[in-house]
Amino acid sequence: MQEKAILIDKKDNVATALRQLGKGDSVPVAVEDLSVSVVLSQDISFGHKFALTDIQQGDAIIKYGEVIGLATKPIRQGEHVHVHNVESQKGRGDKR
Protein backbone atom coordinates (compact mmCIF):
# COMPACT_ATOMS: atom_id res chain seq x y z
CA MET A 1 0.00 0.00 0.00
CA GLN A 2 1.36 3.40 -1.00
CA GLU A 3 1.90 5.85 1.84
CA LYS A 4 -0.43 8.85 1.86
CA ALA A 5 1.83 11.22 3.82
CA ILE A 6 5.26 11.44 5.35
CA LEU A 7 6.36 12.40 8.84
CA ILE A 8 10.02 13.44 8.96
CA ASP A 9 10.84 13.72 12.68
CA LYS A 10 8.96 12.62 15.78
CA LYS A 11 9.08 16.24 17.05
CA ASP A 12 7.05 17.39 14.02
CA ASN A 13 3.47 18.57 14.49
CA VAL A 14 2.75 18.49 10.74
CA ALA A 15 2.98 15.82 8.06
CA THR A 16 3.30 16.27 4.29
CA ALA A 17 0.89 14.79 1.74
CA LEU A 18 2.53 12.46 -0.78
CA ARG A 19 -0.52 12.68 -3.07
CA GLN A 20 -3.83 14.51 -3.26
CA LEU A 21 -5.79 13.71 -0.07
CA GLY A 22 -9.46 14.30 0.55
CA LYS A 23 -11.53 15.65 3.40
CA GLY A 24 -12.50 12.72 5.64
CA ASP A 25 -9.50 10.57 4.64
CA SER A 26 -7.83 8.76 7.52
CA VAL A 27 -4.09 9.23 7.10
CA PRO A 28 -1.66 7.09 9.11
CA VAL A 29 1.91 8.36 9.55
CA ALA A 30 4.81 6.95 11.54
CA VAL A 31 8.44 7.70 12.33
CA GLU A 32 10.66 5.99 14.87
CA ASP A 33 8.42 5.01 17.81
CA LEU A 34 5.67 7.54 16.94
CA SER A 35 2.59 6.44 15.04
CA VAL A 36 -0.55 8.53 14.56
CA SER A 37 -3.61 8.47 12.34
CA VAL A 38 -5.32 11.74 11.44
CA VAL A 39 -8.73 12.26 9.85
CA LEU A 40 -8.48 15.21 7.49
CA SER A 41 -10.97 18.04 7.89
CA GLN A 42 -10.04 19.57 4.53
CA ASP A 43 -8.68 18.49 1.15
CA ILE A 44 -4.87 18.52 1.20
CA SER A 45 -2.91 18.97 -2.04
CA PHE A 46 0.20 16.96 -2.89
CA GLY A 47 3.22 18.44 -1.09
CA HIS A 48 1.15 20.42 1.40
CA LYS A 49 1.12 20.01 5.17
CA PHE A 50 -1.61 19.08 7.62
CA ALA A 51 -1.70 19.32 11.40
CA LEU A 52 -1.09 16.15 13.41
CA THR A 53 -2.41 17.76 16.59
CA ASP A 54 -4.29 20.92 17.54
CA ILE A 55 -1.95 23.90 17.26
CA GLN A 56 -2.72 27.14 19.08
CA GLN A 57 -2.18 30.65 17.71
CA GLY A 58 1.47 31.59 18.26
CA ASP A 59 2.63 27.97 18.59
CA ALA A 60 5.59 26.77 16.57
CA ILE A 61 4.99 24.79 13.38
CA ILE A 62 7.59 22.03 13.43
CA LYS A 63 8.75 20.16 10.32
CA TYR A 64 12.07 18.35 9.88
CA GLY A 65 12.38 18.59 13.67
CA GLU A 66 12.82 22.37 13.29
CA VAL A 67 10.56 25.39 13.73
CA ILE A 68 9.51 26.57 10.26
CA GLY A 69 6.96 29.17 11.35
CA LEU A 70 4.35 30.26 13.85
CA ALA A 71 0.60 29.66 13.71
CA THR A 72 -1.23 32.91 12.98
CA LYS A 73 -4.50 31.40 14.22
CA PRO A 74 -5.60 28.15 15.85
CA ILE A 75 -5.16 25.11 13.59
CA ARG A 76 -7.12 21.96 14.35
CA GLN A 77 -5.83 18.42 13.87
CA GLY A 78 -6.37 17.43 10.23
CA GLU A 79 -6.44 21.01 8.88
CA HIS A 80 -4.32 22.34 6.03
CA VAL A 81 -1.18 24.11 7.25
CA HIS A 82 0.10 26.70 4.77
CA VAL A 83 0.62 30.44 4.24
CA HIS A 84 -2.98 31.26 5.22
CA ASN A 85 -2.34 30.18 8.83
CA VAL A 86 1.46 30.20 9.24
CA GLU A 87 3.96 33.05 9.41
CA SER A 88 7.38 31.91 8.23
CA GLN A 89 10.34 32.44 10.51
CA LYS A 90 12.95 31.37 7.93
CA GLY A 91 14.68 33.58 5.40
CA ARG A 92 12.90 36.76 6.44
CA GLY A 93 14.77 39.99 5.90
CA ASP A 94 12.20 41.99 7.86
CA LYS A 95 12.90 40.27 11.20
CA ARG A 96 16.06 40.37 13.22
Image (cartoon, rainbow, N blue to C red):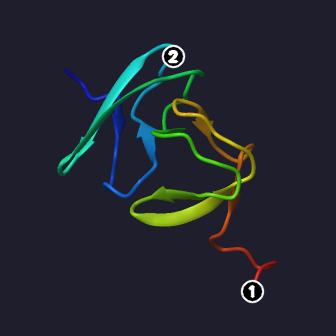
Disc 1 or 2, which lies upstream in sequence?
A: 2
In the image, residue 54 above or below residue 44: below
Q: Residue at x 37, y 58 (%)?
A: 11
Residue type marked 2: Gly
Give how far apart the Cα atoms at labels 1 and 2 are. Answer: 39 Å
Residue 96 in the image: state x and y as whole percent: 75, 86
Residue 54 in the image: state x and y as whole percent: 55, 40
Residue 22 in the image: state x and y as whole percent: 51, 16
Q: Residue furthest top?
A: 24
Crowding around mark 2 (Cα neighbors within 10 Å: few <14, some 14 to 19, many 20+) is some
Report the quarter where the N terminus lies: top left
In the image, residue 20 above or below residue 46: above
Residue under numbered circle 1: 96
Residue 6 in the image: state x and y as whole percent: 34, 41
Q: Disc number at residue 22?
A: 2
Taking 43 as reference, is 14 left or right? Answer: left
Name the one closer to the observer, 20 or 7. 7
Q: Please tell me whether mark 2 sits on a helix, a strand or a loop.
A: loop
Q: Residue at x 49, y 32 (%)?
A: 46
Q: Residue at x 64, y 48 (%)?
A: 56
Residue type marked 1: Arg
